Amino acid sequence: MKQYIMMGASSLLSALLAILIYQFFEHPREVIIRETVPARYTNFDPMDVSKQRHFLSSSPTDFTTAARAVTPAVVNIKTIQGGGGFDFWGGNTMGSASGSGVIISPDGFIVTNNHVIEDSDEIQVTLNDKRDFAAELIGTDPSTDLALIKIKAKGLHFLEFGNSDSLHVGEWVIAVGNPFNLESTVTAGIVSAKGRSIDILEGQDRIESFIQTDAAVNPGNSGGALVNTNGELIGINTAIITRSGRYEGYSFAVPSNLARKVIRDLKDFGLVQRGILGVFIDEITNERAQELGLKAVEGVFVTRVTPGSGADDAGLRKGDVIIGINGVVTKTLPEMQEQLGRYRPGNSVTVDFIRKGKKSTANVLLKNKSNSTAIVTEKNVDVLTDLGFELRELTREERRRLKTNGVKVISIYRGSRIERTNMDPGFIITKIDNKPVESLDALVEDFSNATGKVMLEGIYESYPGEYYYAFPVD
């Protein structure tokens, strides 16, 4: 027993001696641990020379730098409708609305929502420094609820478009606007979802692929900026979902990559140049995925291919499932529409699709509504809208089958001059005032130069003989 006690005491004494010797020879050291998430950047420039970066927000984060950079570029927009006239009962018909906008160039171009300035007679812009300007409307795109206006100013603080594709669900974002006419209100939240469709826009060409956030957005925020913590514009705040009329945690923004293309078109042409694939599409359901033998309930189902379209020329068929555009995965219909919405007629895109269980790729030349690759001009749209119909070029197959050139009537507007002629959709115009019609652009030019009445001559594919329609053009 005594032997064990001696051994324990010897061990304890040796340990204490070792500690004293270590402290004598080894000086103390301070250990500092830093844990950071580096910012990551990548260039992204499909159609524009705007600066594009891939920025990943970190958490926890500091919003002060971004807020300080963004607020000078966000403006208040007030509109007046009705011009101050009087209605039948003697009341004043003047109305007003307000919203927000984002300065995107030092010379005064401002992006906002179409619904902010829609039907307005006057547009008034107030900058963050309290200066007021009258704004000019450059163009609108109801299909994305975007609009471009301009004020006469120089050296303005502006925001650069960021890369909305780089956003991650859960990433911090900041919303800046003028809710309830309050100046430059900043709220923060996270990205709740991407590619959201909430069925608020109208028209066949509508593109709803919103960024959903829980940053507080209220009336007056429409048209304001959604930015990442680096202060880059990654969305235009557009809508909320609410039952109370107030913010309830769901706000939606147009992605910056789509907005950039739309705004550039409005600036360059006054209207959006929309590249059309040429297919009728539907969502993939669980039942359809099982029928087609798909591994996941993802993709866009092709229900019909438009004859003579880019998709038709590239060999896409009814029953194909589109799963990607230019290498970007498109799991849903809104995601596919957003990708296509970034391109113009004449652009080519690669389309990844599944046919009978096998993955394939096709190169598709996008066309416009008129089935050509020409840029649509404001003049063409105005002339045809004023007359009351939509036209398109004949396809190669139609020209071969009918053995004639011409343009085809797609639709006729109610109450228009064309409707009063009793013309029907499907009519193929081969001559105007006995002059052969070679192209849609040439026909529009003839309409523009004509005076008095014009006579259209043409055929219906399903009915024999030639048909004639006369109507005034001025």
Image: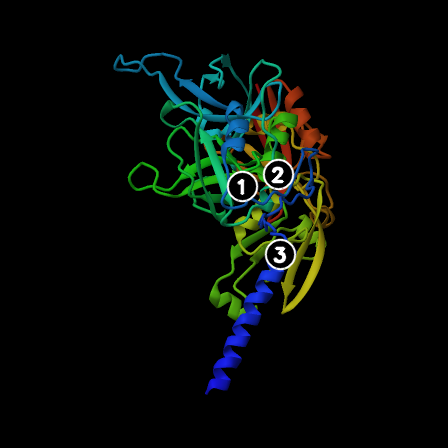
Judging from the image, what secondary structure is the residue with disc 1 in?
loop
Sequence-wise first label, 2 or 3: 3
Whether residue 145 is visible, yes or no, is no
Which amino acid lies under the numbered mark 3 shown in the image of this protein?
A: Phe
Q: What number is the disc on residue 341?
A: none
Residue at image coords 65%, 32%:
376
Sequence-wise first label, 2 or 1: 1
Is the residue 77 above or below the residue 244 in the image? above
Is the residue 365 above or below the residue 146 in the image? below
Q: CA distance from mark 2 to mark 3?
A: 78 Å
Q: Residues within 10 Å of mark 3 (few under 14, many from 20)?
A: few
Which residue lies under the disc numbered 1?
A: 205
Q: CA distance from mark 1 to mark 3?
A: 80 Å
Residue at image coords 62%, 49%:
278
Which amino acid lies under the numbered mark 1 shown in the image of this protein?
A: Asp
Q: What number is the disc on residue 24?
A: 3
Residue at image coords 48%, 81%:
5
Is the residue 50 above or below the residue 356 in the image? above
Labels 2 and 3 touching (C-beta < 8 A): no
Which amino acid lies under the numbered mark 2 shown in the image of this protein?
A: Arg
Front residue (pair 270, 21): 21
Front residue (pair 246, 357): 246
Q: Residues within 10 Å of mark 1 (few under 14, many from 20)?
A: some
Residue at image coords 51%, 46%:
59
